[in-house]
Image (cartoon, grey):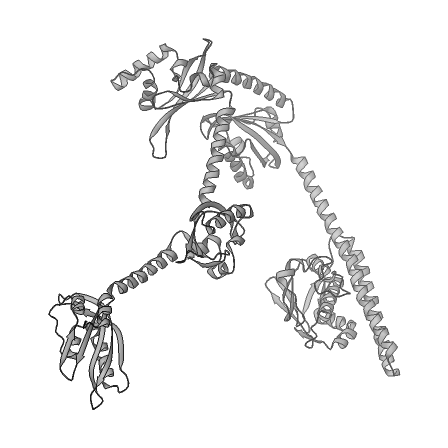
Amino acid sequence: MNTNPYKAILRNANAGYWDLDFSNYKFELSDVLKRIFEWPDLQINSFEDWLTIVHLDDRNRIAALLKDVVSSKGQITFEGECKFQRENGHLFWGEFCGEIIEWTDDNLPARFVGCIFDITLRRQSEAALVLSEERFKGAFENSSVAMAIIDLDGKWLRNNKRMAELFGYTSEELSQLRYQDLTYPDDLEADLLLVNATLEGMIDSYQVEKRYFHKSENIVHGLLSVSLVRDQLGKPVHFITQIQDVTAFKKSQEELYQTSKRLEAILFAGKDVSIIATDLNGIITIFSPGAEELTGYRANEVVGIHSPLILHKKEELNILSQKLTARAAQSYSGFEIFKGILKYFSNTTMQWTYVKKNGEAIPVQLTVSEVKNNDGLVYGYIGVAVDISVIQRAKDDLRRSEQRWQFALEGSENGVWDWDVVNNTIFFSRKWKEIIGYNDDEIGSSTFEWEGRIHPEDLDGFYNALKLHVSGERAFFETEHRLKDKLGNYKWVVSKGKVIEFISENKPKRIIGTTVNITLQKETMNQLIRTLDLAAEQNKRLLSFAHIISHNLRSHSGNFELLFSLLDISSTEKDRGDILAQIRMVTGKLADTIANLNEVVSIQSNSSINKKTIKLKEVLESITLLLKGQINSSKAIIEFNFEDDFVVDFNPAYLESTFLNLLSNCIKYRSHDRFLHIIVTAIKVKEGIEILVQDNGVGLDLDKHGDRVFGLYKTFHGNADARGLGLFMTKNQVEAMGGKISIESEVSIGTTIKIVVP
């Protein structure tokens, strides 16, 4: 059998072959290739013919490829992909390959063989896959639902923007977490059980409602949908999760539940109010405990069985039926009467007579309303009834109670007033008029008699208190204000009252109340407050004074200790003489400090602190001499940035103590990486005098300690000799002078203390 096995293989693989013999000008195309091209008469006689069936988009590329093969001396195979044209002009994707199998004597290609595979379906599948991936990516990234890909251990591999927004993290932050880290602990176990069931193949996916932690630590309620992705062998690869944010829904659900509970409580708690609901046909659906109490029927006797008609007198129903018939020109009877009331009468609150189960007739005030759904469609009716006889008795009891109350108040120190809001007149009792020094016949009933005497600064508070009560926000009207008396002086009073009758909602008809003179109590209270403030201020100064003694004397003691230690190690008489001179100088300064402290003692006995005009430079030079030992030891440089005659109004003892504290702190908390440089600047500002003490010391972390810098016994650097008194004492001294003190500091950079005094 003369069969080429390779051709059979190509035919079975749906691949067409070609054989181009340039030496004999023989061009053979297989039937399969012609079938692929859907071109039975296709003839290819040259490379140019080949290029005519290649699509224009690929023609130059294929021509270059063939040219390279022909011109190459070593390349014998070639392959590629391109779009081909069929006889009908339609395109298909073909994958081709070829090989040079014979050469001429001049070493030029003489014969080519090759094949072409129709790969249109494969390219279409690839394009569809790319499109599908793009669509998935777009849907994933832009979905309004939070979506993520999570590995089998719970780590976030990929998440969309909505997922990051849901939890308040960035995508990068989420990638460092596992979903277990965000799951509310009480919900984790149930979720893990479902995850394991999915991995074990018991379920393919699941949906569960669970709680998560937002980055802000708030709770996020989510409806979680999870599906497992497996590879071709069925091995789990990762999870696809979707989370719908149902936090608002859960909140609304909880609010709805609470509202339902409140309504249920209202419905079943009131024994004095009858609430009866019906369906569209009038059959009772709700019969409240109040309805049972009022009518004597039990709910199980009427619900789903009767209409409210069993409670009404037929005579009243007939009368109302006649009125409706006359107005609507049609007949109304039975439960349709109540529907007619809602349709044709603007006032749906009417007086009826209920007939109780025992036959007793009682007057009630009944209000009938429609019950509508969210679409505004009526699905039932509700009637609220009150036993009017009970209300009437209550009104009578209230009236008698008011009379007794008014009589009792008239015999007390309270002035009574009764405001007729409709007619805008007020009745003032005799005692009310006496409070502001008038006789009974000297004040009329105009509202101006009250409003016109209220201090202008108190009018807004008076009207606001009245508004809050009338609107129902406060149970009583109560206000404290001043009233001008007959002599033109103001008396402090407290007025209290309550609306006892309304024309309609938020429209009062009558308000009754009392007015009490509290002038004496007010003056006594103000005096007590002033006394307490004075005592507090004096206690504050006493405490500050005690701290001054402790802190300043400790500074002198430290100087003595340093100088005496230097005296012990001095080797020459000259050094000892210099040190003794400094000791004498420090001793003199100590005497000056004690003298100043004695002056503070005398100052503390007064309610104010004496100020003097002091040259700032003299005080600072005195302090630097006092601290000379520490300054020299630390090799500090102190610079004064102000005029020599710059003055400040301050208490001398306080000013000396303030700068002694500040400069000592600069030295104590200096940096050991550089020489200490202290700059004292003083300028005049709008508020008075501004003094800045700047250093380049170790600085302070104000984010950590800012609110405690000036606190008592607060230390921040761990120095063994730190007592936490200096800045506390300095702040009290500056504020006692009517000034303000603040701090700016940065770790390893330095600190600036700003003092502003008037």
Residue 492 appears anywhere in the view? yes
Residue 417 percent coordinates (x, y): 56, 26
- Depth check, front residue: 488 or 21: 21
Residue at the outermost bottom position:
106
Side (left or right) of 39 relative to 748: left
Where's residue 250, x and y in %? 47, 42
Toward the viewer: 126 or 79? 79
Task: Give residue 240's quadrant in the image.
Answer: bottom left
Left or right: 726 as drawn, with respect to 421 = right
Q: How many marks?
A: 0
Quadrant in which the C terminus appears: bottom right
- Residue reaching furthest front? 1
**In the image, residue 307 lies at what x, y percent?**
38, 17
The quarter of the picture where residue 10 lies is: bottom left
**Residue at horizontal 17 percent and vertical 71 percent from the top:** 30
Q: Is residue 700 above or below residue 495?
A: below
Q: Looking at the image, is 187 positioned above or below residue 485?
A: below
* Residue 219 visible in rendering: no
x and y percent of residue 552 in the render? 79, 64
Q: Residue furthest left?
A: 41
In the image, residue 375 above or below residue 144? above
Q: Nearer the viewer, residue 641 or 198?
A: 198
Give above or below for 652 relative to 570: above
Please name the residue shown 66% across and 38% down the image.
522
Relative to 182, 411 lies left or right: right
Report the residue that reaches farthest toward the top.
359
Q: Quarter holding the N terminus?
A: bottom left
